[in-house]
Image (cartoon, helix red, strand yellow):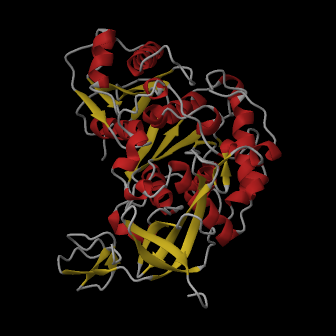
Amino acid sequence: VTGPDVRVAGVGMTSFGKLDDATALDLSVSAVAEAITDSGVDPAAIEAAFFGAAGEFALGQRTLVELGVGGIPVLNTENACATSSTAFYLAHVALRAGEFETVVVGGAHSYAALRRGDTGPGAANLARFDRDFAAGLSLPGIYALLARRHMEDHGTTLEQLALVSVKNHEHGLLNPKAQYHLRLTVDEVLNSRLIADPLTLYHCCPRTDGAAAVVLTTRPGAAGPRVRSCVLGAGSVAGSADERGWGVDLVADTAGRAYARAAVDPADVDVFEVHDAFTIGEVLSYEGLGLCPVGEGGRLIQDRVTWLGGRHVVNPSGGLIARGHPVTATGVAMIAEIAKQLAGGAGAYQVEGARLGVAETMGGGTAGISGNACTVTVLEAA
Amino acid sequence: VTELPLCSVCERCHRAAFPVKRLCPHCGSAELREEPLPADAVVYSCTSIPDGDGGLRHLALVHSGGVRLLAPVPAGGAPLHVGDAVRLQPRTDPPGFEVVAAVGAQL
């Protein structure tokens, strides 16, 4: 798609955590209101809304009604963990095509009902329809399979994987909206409770309530980071040789197309938010995003290249592991974090001089599919 | 359950897919035949997940006849390792299949 430049005019994000007093709608309204205010856009100028709304009925419409914005088309999407980044992708396509000039993109997720014992729709019920989950697999189990194979193939160590958690928790200490503010050691990560061998508790992201939103515009003269490209990639049954082991292939393919459309080299990217649902996910993302050759992701974290102060900072917000992972909101939250970095507004976790940033969201896996979805978005400072 | 589940084998490109498909995911052909998964397999990766009763449930991702699929190790079985030669076998309760270590050399 060619067309006018798309800019992130404003961002909004709630605190992330266990927020029992708020519904997904409450969180969504809060994030969208903040994004609109941050953008300075007249709400009446918003022409469409794109929402990540897995498990929620008409979340986008209900959010806009609460805000007093009506009479505009609304699209609610579901695409596993890449739900709201898929909404962003669709919004970007529509803007580039000239269908709209200013839109809002949001996503919100609440586990409060699940904590009260109502399993509801979504991942909690995967065993009802996924043969692998029925056989005893879990989401951490998928990543555990990836970790075991990566360790076998490339000599990646558990200590290197643990460093991802140590780093992201260290970054999370600087983010007031992060779910966890913990300082961890490698030993504490390795000795935490077993979740899916070889992954222990601190290798894993938490269940998180939260919401995020951005206002996008192609209005001439608008300020804000520019979206250089946004690509949606997806695994399919055709990749069944890669089933339950998407590794770097899906990320590499999606990122390759995003870099090509943006005409950027990953070596020039200053800051990344990547899908660290589990520590091995971040290491695989390093390799898929071209930060290092395949098999050397463990070395990259060990050499502190991806820590704040390093050449390619990854997950300065704390990532999914420390900032938290509100599944339906995660994709747009990652893009919002990059936009904040490129606008110089990330506060204590600001990557100094960041000019080019990338958000990568991975949409889980389902039996027979080599990764449900992957989005890669390249943004550039104004 | 006395047989392993069926997979599809493409008459045109001769590649397999699991579970049974209507179209070949590799070449798009509709000319597919169905046959039971081969019993011989090799472990691609593996994990063990707490079962909630103080034990572990062992799972293996295996290559079998050109497809990759997940299979549980029978209750009480030992964990498997990457590269292990294994055999798929039918399971009756609950219905499905499981994976056990093969006797003999690695595949």
| Marker count (numbered) | 0
Left or right of A253, for residue B84: right
Left or right of A345, for residue A160: right
Tell me where residue A183 appears, x and y as whole percent: 78, 33
* Residue A355, visible in the rendered structure: no
Q: Is residue B68 above or below residue B75?
A: below
Q: Is residue B94 above or below residue B37?
A: above
Q: Is residue B77 above or below residue A276?
A: below
Q: Is residue A314 above or below residue A285?
A: above
Residue pushed farthest top? Answer: A68
Which residue appears at 43% of the width and 40% of the height? A124
Tell me where residue A86 appears, x and y as whole percent: 37, 41
Q: Quadrant of residue A352?
A: top right
Which residue appears at 33% of the width and 12% of the height? A43
Which residue appears at 74% of the width and 30% of the height? A182
Tell me where residue B65 appears, x and y as whole percent: 41, 82
Left or right of A314, for residue B15: left
Q: Nearer the viewer, residue A1 or A151?
A: A151
Tell me where residue A323 appears, x and y as whole percent: 61, 31
Q: Nearer the viewer, residue A115 or B55?
A: B55
Q: Nearer the viewer, residue A329 or A95?
A: A329
Which residue appears at 43% of the width and 53% of the height? A133
* Residue B87, visible in the rendered structure: yes
